[in-house]
Image: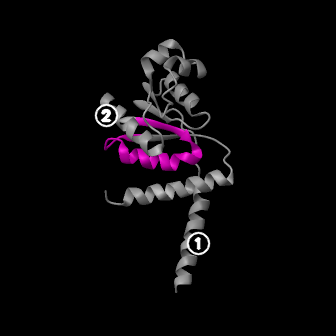
């Protein structure tokens, strides 16, 4: 009986992983939001966030989880951000250290600016967990548009991220 239960659990886990791995989200184009949020950590994320603002699809960009040693001028130089865009439309967040704290930092910024819709830009393999964490933290009723940066993750990356997604889902379901 226990062996069947463990086998069934393993089967559900395996099929869940396969579904996760083959249904990675895609980029979104054309949809406008109040803001765009980019948690640091993967190639192409910040460039995509800047592109969204430059195309007029969002008013402001919030980059969460920036290293505290990085100054605005260094950031602008690294990502070739024009001064006017940096001044009006880009805000750097220095408090977050992981996906959950990215969500908390971004939620505070969203509340302060009274935004009601956001484009979440992150790597395709990270989107499920990031969207889950952000939907928990952002103000109720906030519209989240998931805009994934396409990557070529290896099996180890997918496996680790799937397990982090499961752990996050379990922890979100537990009472505080």
**Residue 169 point in image, percent of width and height:** 44, 57
How many numbered callouts? Answer: 2
The residue carrying mark 1 is 11
Q: What element carries label 1?
A: helix
**Residue 2 point in image, percent of width and height:** 52, 83
On residue 43, which mark appears?
none
Q: Sequence-wise, which precedes: disc 1 or disc 2?
A: 1
| Frontmost residue, 164 versus 86 | 164
Q: Which residue lies furthest to the bottom in this view?
A: 1
User: Can I make out residue 40 in this image?
Assistant: yes
**Residue 33 point in image, percent of width and height:** 42, 32
Q: Tell me where residue 4 sits by quadrant.
A: bottom right
Few, some or many C-alpha atoms within 10 Å of disc 1 (few <14, some 14-19, many ≥20)? few
Q: How far apart are marks 1 and 2 (CA)?
A: 42 Å
Q: Give the range drawn in magenta.
A: 118-144
**In the image, residue 138 lies in the stretch drawn in magenta:** yes
Which residue is drawn at the image coordinates 39% and 46% (left, top)?
A: 135
Which residue is drawn at the image coordinates 34% and 32% (left, top)?
A: 115
Q: Residue furthest front?
A: 69
The residue carrying mark 2 is 111
Which residue is drawn at the image coordinates 32% and 59% (left, top)?
A: 175
Q: In this view, does 77 lie above or below 150?
A: above
| Frontmost residue, 61 versus 58 | 61
* Left or right: 83, with 137 as reference point: right
Q: Tell me where residue 7 sits by quadrant.
A: bottom right
């Amino acid at each position: 009986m226990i062996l069947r239960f463990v086998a069934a659990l393993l089967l559900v886990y395996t099929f869940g992983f396969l579904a996760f791995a083959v249904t990675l989200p895609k980029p979104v184009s054309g949809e406008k939001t109040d803001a765009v949020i980019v948690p640091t950590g993967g190639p192409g994320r910040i460039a995509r966030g800047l592109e969204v603002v430059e195309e007029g699809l969002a008013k402001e960009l919030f980059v969460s989880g920036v290293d505290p040693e990085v100054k605005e001028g260094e950031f602008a130089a690294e990502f070739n951000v024009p001064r006017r865009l940096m001044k009006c439309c880009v805000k750097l967040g220095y408090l977050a250290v992981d996906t959950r704290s990215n969500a908390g930092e971004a939620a505070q910024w969203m509340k302060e600016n009274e935004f009601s819709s956001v484009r979440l830009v992150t790597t395709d393999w990270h989107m499920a967990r990031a969207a889950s964490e952000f939907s928990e933290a952002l103000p109720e009723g906030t519209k989240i548009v998931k805009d994934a940066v396409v990557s070529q993750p290896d099996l180890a990356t997918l496996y680790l991220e799937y397990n982090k997604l499961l752990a996050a889902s379990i922890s979100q379901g537990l009472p505080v």
